[in-house]
Amino acid sequence: MAQVGAPAVGELLADRYRLDEHINDDSTGRQVWRGTDVLLARPVTVVLRTPGGEEAQEMLTAAVAASRVNHAHIVGVYDAVDEGDRAYIVREWVEGRSLRDIVIHSPLDANHAISLTLAVAEAVAAVHASGVAHGNVHPGTVLLSDDDRVVLSDPRGGAAATQTGDVRAIGATLYCALTGLWPREVPGPAILPDAGRDDSGRILPAAEAKPGVPGYLDRLTTELLDPSESPPTAAELVDELSRLEGTEGTGALEFVTEPDSSPEGTVSRPVGKRFAYGIAGMVVVALLALLVVTKLLPDGEPAGGNPGGVVADPSSSAKTTAAQELQLSGDKVKLIKPNSENEQQGDIPKTVDGDPKTSWHTNWYTKPNFGNIPESQPGMGLLIDLGEEREITQVIVHLGQTGSEISLRAGTDVSDTKGIIDDFTTLDGPKVNDKATVRFAPDPGTKTRYLMVWIGKLGPKGDGTFQATVQEITVYAN
């Protein structure tokens, strides 16, 4: 059995976890080691605390809760052991660097900061959906792997951890990613320089701390860190960051569309002052640009140099701004499986039930191409009957892990499920999901009654097998 006392290189914990190298100590004095699971021959991280027993219960409880959350942006937890004199958790080893070690040298640009923070927010939203708080969100627990994954590690939980505190910490992490500075009101790495203050003692806005930070991110971080503002939930923050992702270089009116899925007679939660300001500013810029272009063009020549004088149907623009989230029914979703009769069926309605805590997953296979399905018919799909023909504006697919190859398809004839593979056309994709959310944007004016989320290849589970997990499919249409 493992010896009790000071850990040493080469020591074997629980008869299977070998300590290979002491990496560092975290802010609570826990030792972080690189190790090896000698039974499965894979690298692991061992977080060791002395003493164990009652004083380690918070750490162990948080680890057990995290082990139940299967998410692409959360570090996998393999084991939690209490030996009395010491306790330790064993988790996935991530080859790469922490955000803390990156920003201490140079902050991130806006696009990378948004993408990274979106991944963190998705991870936290998944934790919150399980009914607990993470309690340890900061640049030291945000890891960027060498294979371009963003993962959140080391939940702390406990009575002091709250979901509101997690969202504030996401805002502080975004602030830090943009500026390289850390707001001390939020627990975090002591090694990072403190955010500056104005004359009243408030944190300097990100754009003042680091010139060049876009205004919409300056307003977003300010609101998230303002104790007088009620923060959004982590899931709501995911939606807002998703809309901001890819802002740099996009059209001026990119964010004007705000699908309204609130039931009649209810008031939806405001998206926040930052979006009110941002949208108003973008509308003004777009109108000014339109006036300038109109002034410069010869009389009678439409903008864009349309030599035929063809004017777009104004109703199409109105329809775009009216796009709504469709309420999908579980009995209208079916699995299309060309050559695999032995697949999961009962959980398919969970892909459209509006609950991110539920999901459907394929069986696991030894190969990403579903193992025994011939290459002539690779993959399987989730076929959705919208009930009537609709103009599709966007489809969002939330997956439980990365690495799957998916595409969005559409067709009219669903009588021959085998023939769907050839008869359905691809609207967008295929895309390999490098984060948990994949967005499809069909060409404007695309109309269909039948949509299919097609899974061409499966993502790795981390144990040598492959699987795809679909948590939710959201369809926006006119």
Image: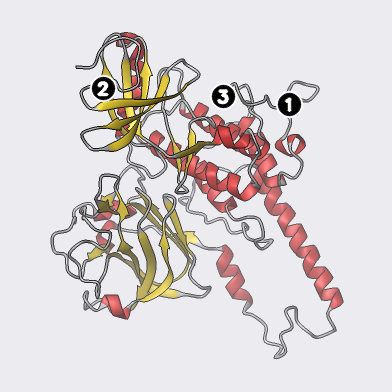
Residue 312 versus residue 352 in the image, above or below: below
Say the numbered circle drawn on residue 159: none
| Other residues around mark 3 within 10 Å, as few (<14) / some (14–19) / many (≥20) | some
Residue assigned mark 2:
12
Amino acid at the residue labelled 3: Pro
Question: Can you see residue 43?
Answer: yes
For the N terminus, the image quarter is top left
Q: Earlier in the sequence, mark 2 or mark 3?
A: 2
The residue at the point 70 percent across, 91 percent down is 308
Q: Nearer the viewer, mark 1 or mark 2?
A: 2
Q: Quadrant of residue 52?
A: top left
Residue assigned mark 3:
189
Percent position (x, y) of residue 278?
A: 69, 50
Q: Earlier in the sequence, mark 1 or mark 2?
A: 2
Question: Can you see residue 267?
Answer: no
Residue assigned mark 1:
196
Of the pair 83 and 65, the residue shown nearer to us: 83
Per the image, label 2 sits on a secondary structure element best described as strand
As measured in the structure, the alpha-carbon distance from the residue carrying label 1 to the one carrying label 2 is: 46 Å
Per the image, label 1 sits on a secondary structure element best described as loop
Tell me if 221 is positioned left or right of 324 in this view.
Answer: right
Q: Earlier in the sequence, mark 3 or mark 1?
A: 3
Q: Nearer the viewer, mark 3 or mark 1?
A: 3
